[in-house]
Amino acid sequence: MRDTLRGQFLLATKHLHDPNFFRSAVLLLEHNHEGAMGVIINRPSSVNLSHALVGHFDVPPNESVIYVGGPVEPSALSMLHGDAAWGEDDLAVVPGVYVGGSAEAFEEVVINSTSTGCNVPFRIFSGYAGWGSGQLESEINRGDWFTLQARSEFVFSDQPYDIWDELIREFHRQHRMLPIPADKAEWN
């Protein structure tokens, strides 16, 4: 296993029976000797972004929703966005995906993208997924998770309910024994 899984997707396998992670795709934002944390990228909630932020930001009505990032601290909000210029100090997780690290960056991204109609992608998450020291490694060794290099097009996908299926197919494509499917397997 690599020294760090930061910037990887965790894909829940069929062996993982925790209902919090059924068919989930988690983007790992941090992974070190103290543990790991990430957000589930394929769980949009029914909570509208403009309604959720009333009293904090003046967000015009829009179609954006809050995503369920994980079972830990569900009232805490975090943000991923796709433009380095919006938060010069924001942490890049993978190319094209940045963690909004300040209230100012959060406000700038949400207000600019919803009021000006710009096309820079972003997601707001409630809660996160977290693991203590060695816990994630143990779950991976037990067969609960597959890992796959993360890519921005999945993080900001317009079809969040399809992400897990697409990533599982990609994982199996990258890990199959034969380079292409055989038309006549009996010829092998």
Image (cartoon, rainbow, N blue to C red):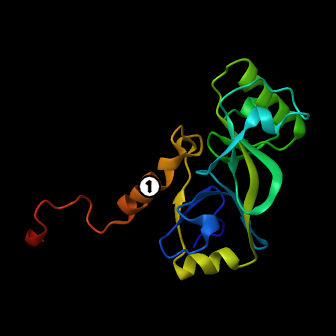
Is residue 87 in sight in this rendering? no
Query: Is residue 138 visible from the viewing direction of this image?
Result: yes
Left or right for 39, reference 145 = right
Residue 109 location in percent, x, y? 77, 31
Q: Quadrant of residue 62?
A: top right
Q: Which residue is outermost to the right?
A: 55
Relative to 5, is 63 above or below?
Answer: above
Residue in the picture at 91% in, 34% down? 55
Q: Residue, x 71% and y 79% (percent of image)? A: 134
Q: Which quadrant would the C terminus be assigned to in this image?
A: bottom left
Q: Residues within 10 Å of mark 1 (few under 14, many from 20)?
A: some
Q: In the shown orientation, is residue 156 left or right of residue 34? A: left
Residue 88 figure quarter = top right
User: How many marks on residues?
Assistant: 1
Percent across and percent down for residue 172 are 38, 63
**Is 103 on the left-hand or right-hand side of 133?**
right
- Where, quadrant-wise, is the N terminus in this rendering? bottom right
The residue that disc 1 covers is: 165
- Measuring 64% from the left and 33% from the top, which residue is drawn there? 121
Q: Nearer the viewer, residue 172 or 113?
A: 113
Front-lying residue, 72 or 94: 72
- Is residue 142 depicted above or below 100 in this figure? below
Task: Give residue 26's quadrant in the image.
Answer: bottom right
- Which residue is nearer to you in this view: 79 or 45? 45
User: Residue 12 location, x and y as percent?
Assistant: 54, 66
What percent of the width, then of the height, locates residue 56? 90, 35
Going by the numbered disc 1, the residue's amino acid type is Asp
State left or right for residue 85 relative to residue 168.
right
